Image (cartoon, rainbow, N blue to C red):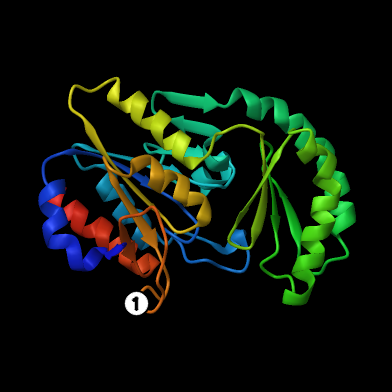
Amino acid sequence: MMKRLKHEWQTLSKRLQTVNLALFLDYDGTLTPIVRHPRLAKLSNQHRQILRRLNRCPHIWMAIVSGRELKEVKRFVRIPSMTYAGNHGFQVSGPGLHLVHPQAKKSARLFQKLLPALRAELKTISGLWVENKQLTLSIHYRQVRARDVARAKQTLQKILKPFLRQRRLKMTEGKKVWELRPPVTWHKGEAVKWLLRQKQSKSKRPWLPIFIGDDVTDEDAFKAVKGHGIGVKVVYNLKRKPVRSQASYGVASVREVFWFLQVLQQLRG
């Protein structure tokens, strides 16, 4: 059962006091609140400074792991010395690190061919829009009327049916978004494991992973760190909402995420 992080901090802080920490952070819904359009999810200067200070702490290594396109999440966070994984981990960039998943390069051609057809077929559904993230595609329906969501999904599945049947792509779902990804077992969890291996290969001491996220797509990362690390899920209305998750701890808001990051910085700074 997921525990409230604030209530467990006194015990947890003892575990985190002296170990190397690999801190992985989702962006949307974790570092910024969920908003009606992704372009509005701006990181405040105050929160950016908290991330900067934590990033300078000895024995703490930080990475943003987001579903956004790599160049976009880097532009929103604007801390060059951090590591970034975009497109659910299909792209990685950071000091001494670079990855573009080989299958993502192959699938990118298919997604770019599909893009005009998707936009043409879905344009009649008010509020729906297709985001081109080069290596993946996202179909956002947060602003679609509830009565039109089922029709939108049926239209999308009809277009994708031959490609799904031939296993040329994967369709997954997040918060008010359908994601089209390359047809491989690669996600935020695999990206976190890959990043940990890179970091561990250059260090004699082990790194304890912490992943903080809010979405269904973050469950893979919670599972990846479970047992040897710490998963923290952002759950709005946490007090009233029982949640099934691979995460061990819960926080109730973006504000509570930054409370944790600040007390962690005070503990290790």
Q: Is residue 93 left or right of residue 133?
A: left
State the image coordinates of residue 155 (x, y, percent, origin top left).
84, 57
State the image coordinates of residue 220 (x, y, percent, origin top left).
46, 45
Q: Is residue 47 left or right of residue 202?
A: right
Q: Is residue 19 left or right of residue 42?
A: left
Going 33% across and 65% down the picture, which residue do you hit?
A: 251
Residue in the foreground of this view, choosing between 213 and 73? 213
Going 10% across and 51% down the picture, which residue do you hit?
A: 14
Query: Could you tell me if residue 269 is visible in this image?
Result: no
State the image coordinates of residue 204 (x, y, percent, origin top left).
18, 22
State the image coordinates of residue 76 (x, y, percent, origin top left).
50, 51
* SS at badge 1: loop
Going 48% across and 25% down the picture, which residue do you hit?
A: 98
Q: Quadrant of residue 127?
A: bottom right
Q: Which residue is mark 1?
A: 239
Q: Quadrant of residue 11?
A: bottom left
Image quarter hosting the N terminus:
bottom left
Residue in the foreground of this view, choosing between 123 and 5? 5
Query: Could you tell me if residue 198 is visible in this image?
Result: yes
Structural crowding at the residue carrying mark 1, measured as other residues with C-alpha within 10 Å and reported as few (<14), some (14–19) or many (≥20): few
Q: Is residue 132 left or right of residue 1?
A: right
Q: Quadrant of residue 147?
A: bottom right
Please determine whether, in this image, residue 49 is positioned above or below residue 115: below
Amino acid type shown at disc 1: Lys
Going 34% across and 42% down the picture, which residue do you hit?
A: 225
